[in-house]
Image (cartoon, helix red, strand yellow):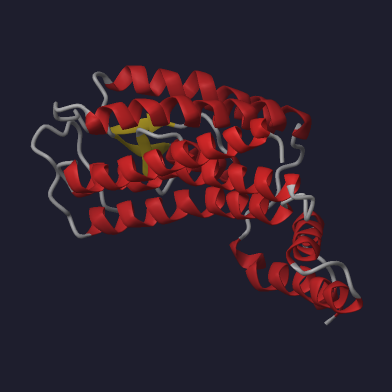
Amino acid sequence: MLDRLRFPQPWLSLTLFVTWQFLSDGISGGSLVLGLILAWGIPQMTRSFWPDPPAFIKAWRAPAFVLRVLWDIVVASVEVAKLILSPGQPRPAFICYPLELEHPLAISILASTISLTPGTVSADVSDDNKLLLIHALDAENDQEVIDAIRNRYEKPLLEMFQ
Amino acid sequence: MTPFTEYAISALLIVGGVFTLIGAIGLARLPDFYTRLHGPTKATTVGVGAIVISSVLYFSTLGQDIGIEEILITAFLFMTAPVSANFLAKAAMHLQVKTAKNTRGQSWDQ
């Protein structure tokens, strides 16, 4: 019973609470109470879906990673736009990407990053968390795509999570 | 509102509109389901991003708000778009949707 009264993920609860204050029209007694209820209830309801948190995240490396991803989104969007408007057919490919990351949270961040950057969508993760299936819109050669992802995204994530 | 911010807002709106349009063209033009997945989820990331930034600029120069809501919209969009793309791809693989003839590699279904 006491277990139910705790906040199993303090950071998630804090994020939910603060986000709710921004979403509601100014901070009031009502928004504080409702924010608290959400900050308690949502982590409780979703607790079985969350992986065990990693021991240590080097969070100060995150801003550089986010900026790099945003920049890549802009650059790659222009490339995809050119590809869509050019008369030739794209050369799509399914690529198996061997993962070096091990933590489920890190893998899902990598998969989301791959999906957000234009030109690649992560389609699936193998059951043993060793392979990521990526669909590339226009890829001449599998190894190039794998190397680009490895150097630009997976290495910084590896440094953050280990 | 200074002319400079007005130009910036207009430019961002045009960029956003163009990218959204290109995403829609991609949806119509690309050869198979998987490649069509790229058009709307991708080109629109920049499209929506640009429109949201212009909205932030507009309302902050009017002095009403600093536009935290718009930034939250972007954050939610960036968090949910990969998930929906992933599930569409998974569903397509499960149904063994046909791929374009020149696709290299194989999808899998586990």
Q: Quadrant of residue B4?
A: top right
Q: Is residue A91 visible?
A: yes
- Name of the residue lying farthest toward the bottom: A1
- Residue A46 appears in which quarter of the rendering? bottom right
Nearest the viewer among A92 and A79 is A79
Q: Name the quadrant of the C terminus of chain A.
A: top right
Q: In this view, does B44 lie to the left or right of B38?
A: right
Q: Residue at x 38, y 45 (%)?
A: B20
User: On the picture, is B39 further left or further right than A13?
Assistant: left
Specify the farthest residue to the left: B101
Q: Where is residue A110 in the image (x, y as percent from the top left)?
A: 52, 37
User: What x and y, as percent, mark residue A22?
Assistant: 77, 60
Q: Looking at this view, is A45 or B14 the one in front? A: B14
Question: Residue B87 occupies which quadrant of the picture?
Answer: bottom left
Above or below for A58 versus A140:
below
Q: Residue at x 71, y 31 (%)?
A: A63
On screen, residue B30 above or below A82: below
Query: In the image shown, does A48 or A14 lie closer to the viewer?
Result: A14
Quarter of the figure with the N terminus of chain A: bottom right
Residue drawn at the location 53% of the way across and 45% of the way down: B51
| In the image: residue A127, left or right of residue A27 | left
Q: Where is residue B61 in the image (x, y as percent from the top left)?
A: 74, 44
Residue B13: give x, y in percent of width and height: 50, 42
What is the number of callouts on the image?
A: 0
Residue A93 visible from this viewpoint: no
Q: Which of A107 and B1 is in front in this view?
A: B1
